């Protein structure tokens, strides 16, 4: 195969798709049935034979014990899925691997080459363990290298590839199980993801479920039959009903009403019960309206976070099967106003974008033997160039490989294969390197010959002799969808990477241990929890992994207040690795434990549900007492969320693991929502705090700040005012932190700043974890103070702070963090 | 060195314009082009790209820093902040002297500024 093979895969909840790009044109891969979409369904029969796709999907109703679907929603959890006949249990990533294997085979059949690497799309709001599981699935499917791309970025890339519009636009991606929305901007051919938002547990499936609930409510109303999702007896019938509803939903986009008849659907104590109802378009729309509104709210929230009005959007790109619903389209159109991009296929856009991304990452899927240039001969050169670029004149940088024998060129030149352009002859630097700018033909793959000449002017063959750059879009480094940091023992979060940080990224900070870890003890563990989320408190963020250092791994005991240098690293697809260096012991720890979505047992869910219900009721009475109508209104949203979680917990009791995970996430979101409501009750106090702190910071910065700091403070104050006017608590607190930092910097320039801090810290000496050491420090501090040694006083205060205790309750909330 | 000086130092030494060797007036395409060139040069270990000049001295350049700088300059808000610092004349940190007349002591200030919980 002479042309490159860039493969992109959309591994969907309901369907999966593959596309290939050869540098010029995109090709959709067809499966054995000739379709572009392969249902993400796997069946394993009694003999252990695996069937994937449409053939498996046809058996999902009649043989649910051996056929599994929607496992994408369980990726990253420890939930194993049983195949009764084969007596096998498979992890979600193993089932995803079967789907990927099938797609890989389809590529081979259509294009003659089984790709060795590919780009796979994942939802933007996938948690880290879910991304890790996707990579594992690719490995199991036989891909030696894989990169992940966030689905909305992939859609944007495909949409941007086929359009020349400049400006801001929105990708509204409603898949089977997840909803993503991204705000993008194209300018000068550079595609930038400005930001994204979404709901990891809102998808077409939830629309179907809403209609099923509506049908069950009618059964109760008309026949007095109460079918509960918690009853395992009804699991099969419910699946059958859901399938019927799914088909009816599609039909109803063309007609106003439709009978839904499932004879003998449910077995009850009083005999079989038929489902015989008339579904009208109006009823279906009413059932789905809250879900559509939920998606629109996410879009509006994203726009507001970036200071945009819907009217400023150039267009909206719809992605995903459920976006075919006319009702959804009209609601989204009415709320956002911008026109839809109509010439794009919502079902295959993500796979096409993933293939384009493979090209921009230079991820050629041809196996080494077939992709290699014909027997490389000549002096070896390392080349660096963008595989795809929006720039018409990008740079190509090269360097002779050291240690390679053969004649060395004195000059190099690049010649475009069409003969339309060539670079000037460029002498090699002392390091044997060159930097040349090339000229590209727009929207084409541009192949360049690399020519070398010796000092005598004779040609010197170089390897590689040629390379290709595709002129198209440049995708800026994908941004991180949620901030990532370390939970500290005081339940605060030390943010390592802010939301929006470009990936890949790496950051190191120094933390300190809260207490000693004895050498040799297995029960004694230093735990460093890694969390993901935007809220200030660790317990409101998602725990995505933890680095644990056990006593039996230590060369020597680790004292309290020991330094730990923690490095977190994220690759382009958002995969996380962590590394802790303990300088005192010269030991490095890299084992990230618990990189798994937590289990969601019905018991733990019920416990969470009860607590949330109590908290909601207390908040409501408190809101009424204080006369806070805004908070009361926000609590009614919490009410709806609670009802939904209750339904999911019930389904989890009936054996639906996916609903259990959804309930777990829902509870976490509800917790954050209640926290916000509680903060809403404290809004007047927050406003007062902001007023005071702005005054304090202004005073310090005016006295001790630089003009640049004064300008930054002015900006931060304006941002605070905007957030205050819009009653955006999280934003307000974020800007307030900037104000504090600026005030802080200026404050410490005051000659007495450390003296005041010393007074405050020494008054708490009796609480110190090591009182005698703390008293000694206080004596040292007093001497330093008398002798006006400010630098030493500062060191003393910093050491004193580290001896002061963290609250045990806060530490427990902070996922048992052992660092500060 | 006081915390604030450290802060000023950090702002100058990691200024995105300095890292990329560009002027605050550069275009967006220049940011991309220069960033791509520097990343390629760093990947090949070329000494020419290994350092960059700032008002506070030469600093080592890394691929992470180049990527972060490109992202900073793509976003109009963060670009503005960096443009502000890129225009500061060298030697600014030394000019940070406390005012001669000390304001009255304010023991509550640290708490108000949110450093520590009240003791």
Image (cartoon, rainbow, N blue to C red):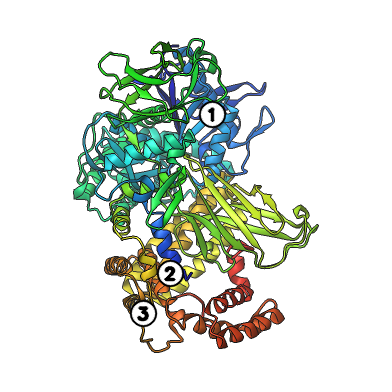
| Residue B73 x/y as whole percent | 32, 48
Tell me which residue sits at (35%, 67%) in the image: A732
Question: What residue would you read off at disc 1?
Answer: A145
The answer to whether A380 is drawn above or below residue A128 in the figure is above
CA gap between label 3 and label 1 equals: 54 Å
Question: What residue would you read off at disc 3?
Answer: A696
Q: Quadrant of the C terminus of chain A?
A: bottom right
> Which tag is nearer the camera, tag 2 or tag 3?
2
Q: Secondary structure at mark 1?
A: strand
| Residue A338 x/y as whole percent | 20, 43
Frontmost residue, A191 versus A103: A191
Disc on the earlier residue, 3 or 1 = 1
> Which tag is nearer the camera, tag 3 or tag 1?
3
Question: What residue would you read off at disc 2?
Answer: B4
In this image, B46 relative to A76: left or right? left
The answer to whether A782 is drawn above or below residue A62 in the figure is below
Q: Confirm whether circles 1 and 2 share one chain.
A: no
In this image, A324 relative to A209: left or right? left
| Residue A778 x/y as whole percent | 63, 84
Q: Confirm whether circles 2 and 3 share one chain.
A: no
Q: Confirm whether circles 3 and 1 share one chain.
A: yes
Category of crowding for the residue at label 2, using alpha-carbon neighbours closer than 10 angstroms: few (below 14), some (14–19), many (at least 20): many
């Amino acid at each position: 195969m002479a042309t490159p093979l860039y493969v992109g895969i959309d591994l969907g909840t309901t369907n999966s798709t593959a596309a290939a790009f050869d540098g010029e044109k995109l090709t959709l891969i067809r499966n054995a049935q000739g379709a572009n979409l392969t249902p993400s369904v796997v069946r394993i029969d009694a003999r252990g034979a695996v069937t994937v796709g449409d053939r498996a999907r046809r058996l999902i109703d009649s043989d649910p014990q051996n056929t599994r679907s929607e496992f994408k929603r369980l990726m990253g959890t420890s939930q194993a899925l049983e195949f009764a006949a084969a007596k096998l249990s498979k992890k979600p990533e193993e089932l995803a691997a079967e789907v990927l294997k099938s797609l890989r085979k389809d590529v081979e059949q259509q294009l003659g080459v089984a790709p060795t690497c590919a780009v796979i799309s994942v939802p933007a709001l996938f948690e880290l363990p879910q991304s890790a599981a996707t990579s594992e699935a690719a490995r199991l499917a036989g891909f030696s290298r894989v990169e992940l791309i966030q689905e909305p970025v992939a859609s944007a890339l495909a949409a941007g590839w086929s359009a020349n519009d400049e400006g801001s636009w929105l990708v509204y991606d409603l898949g089977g199980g997840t909803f993503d929305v991204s705000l993008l901007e194209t300018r000068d051919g550079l595609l930038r993801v400005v930001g994204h938002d979404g709901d990891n547990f809102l998808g077409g499936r939830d629309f179907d479920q809403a209609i099923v609930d509506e049908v069950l409510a009618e059964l109760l109303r008309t026949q007095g039959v109460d079918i509960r999702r918690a009853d395992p007896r009804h699991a099969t019938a419910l699946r059958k009903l859901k399938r019927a509803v799914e088909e009816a939903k599609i039909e109803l986009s063309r007609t106003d009403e439709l009978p839904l008849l499932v004879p003998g659907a449910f077995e009850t104590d009083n005999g079989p019960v038929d489902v015989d109802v008339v579904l009208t378009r109006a009823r279906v729309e009413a059932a789905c309206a809250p879900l559509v509104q939920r998606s629109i709210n996410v879009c509006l929230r994203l726009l507001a976070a970036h200071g945009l009005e819907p009217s400023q959007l150039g267009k909206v790109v719809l992605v995903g099967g459920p976006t075919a619903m006319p009702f959804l389209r009209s609601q989204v159109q009415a709320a956002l106003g911008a026109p839809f991009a109509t010439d794009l296929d919502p079902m295959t856009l993500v796979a096409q974008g993933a293939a384009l991304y493979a090209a921009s990452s230079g991820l050629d899927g041809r196996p080494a033997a077939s992709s290699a240039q014909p027997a490389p001969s000549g002096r070896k050169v390392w080349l660096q160039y963008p595989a795809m670029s929006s720039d018409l004149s990008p740079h190509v940088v090269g360097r002779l490989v050291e240690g390679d024998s053969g004649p060395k060129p004195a000059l190099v030149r690049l010649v475009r294969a069409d003969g339309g352009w060539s670079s000037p002859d460029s002498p090699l630097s002392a390091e044997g390197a060159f930097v040349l700018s090339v000229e590209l033909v727009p929207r084409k793959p541009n192949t360049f010959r690399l020519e070398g000449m010796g000092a005598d002017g004779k040609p010197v063959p170089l390897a590689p002799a040629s390379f290709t750059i595709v002129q198209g879009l440049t995708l800026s480094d994908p941004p991180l969808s949620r901030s990532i940091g370390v939970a500290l023992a005081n339940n605060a979060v030390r943010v390592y990477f802010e939301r929006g940080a470009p990936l890949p990224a790496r950051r190191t900070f120094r933390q300190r241990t809260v207490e000693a870890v004895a050498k040799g003890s297995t029960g004694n563990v230093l735990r460093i929890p890694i969390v993901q989320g935007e809220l200030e408190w660790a317990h409101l963020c998602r725990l995505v992994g933890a680095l644990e250092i056990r006593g039996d791994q230590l060369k020597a005991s680790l004292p309290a207040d020991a330094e730990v240098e923690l490095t977190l690293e994220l690759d382009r697809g958002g995969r996380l690795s962590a590394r802790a260096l303990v300088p005192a012991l010269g030991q490095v720890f890299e084992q990230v434990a618990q990189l798994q979505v937590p289990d969601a047992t019905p018991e733990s869910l019920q416990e969470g549900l009860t607590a949330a219900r109590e908290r909601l009721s207390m908040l409501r009475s408190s809101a009424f007492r204080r006369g806070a109508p805004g908070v009361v209104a926000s609590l009614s949203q919490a009410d709806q969320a609670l009802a939904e979680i209750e339904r999911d917990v019930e389904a989890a009791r009936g054996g639906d693991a996916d609903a259990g995970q959804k309930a777990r996430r829902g509870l976490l979101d509800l917790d954050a929502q209640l926290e916000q409501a509680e903060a809403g009750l404290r809004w007047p106090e927050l406003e007062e705090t902001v007023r005071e702190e702005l005054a304090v910071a202004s005073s310090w910065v005016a006295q001790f700040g630089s003009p640049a700091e004064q300008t930054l403070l002015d900006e931060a104050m304006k941002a605070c005012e905007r957030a205050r006017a819009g009653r955006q608590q999280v934003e307000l607190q974020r800007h307030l932190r900037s104000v504090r930092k600026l005030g802080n910097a200026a404050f410490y320039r005051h000659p007495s700043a450390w003296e005041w801090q010393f007074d405050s810290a020494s008054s708490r000496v009796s609480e110190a974890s090591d009182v005698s050491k703390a008293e000694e420090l206080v004596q040292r501090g007093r001497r330093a103070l008398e002798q006006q040694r400010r630098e030493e006083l500062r060191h003393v205060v910093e050491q004193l702070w580290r001896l002061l205790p963290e609250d045990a309750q806060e530490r427990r909330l902070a996922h048992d963090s052992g660092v500060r | 060195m006081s915390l604030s000086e450290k802060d000023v130092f950090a702002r100058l030494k990691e200024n995105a314009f300095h890292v990329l060797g560009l002027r605050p007036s550069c275009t967006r395409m220049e940011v991309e082009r220069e960033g791509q060139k520097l990343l390629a040069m760093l990947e090949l270990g070329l000494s020419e790209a290994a350092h960059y000049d700032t008002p506070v001295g030469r600093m080592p350049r890394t691929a992470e820093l180049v990527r972060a700088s490109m992202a900073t300059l793509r976003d109009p808000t963060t670009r503005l902040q960096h443009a502000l610092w890129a225009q500061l004349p060298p030697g600014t940190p030394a000019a940070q002297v406390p005012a001669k007349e000390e304001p009255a002591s304010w023991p509550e200030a640290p708490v108000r500024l949110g450093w520590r919980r009240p003791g």
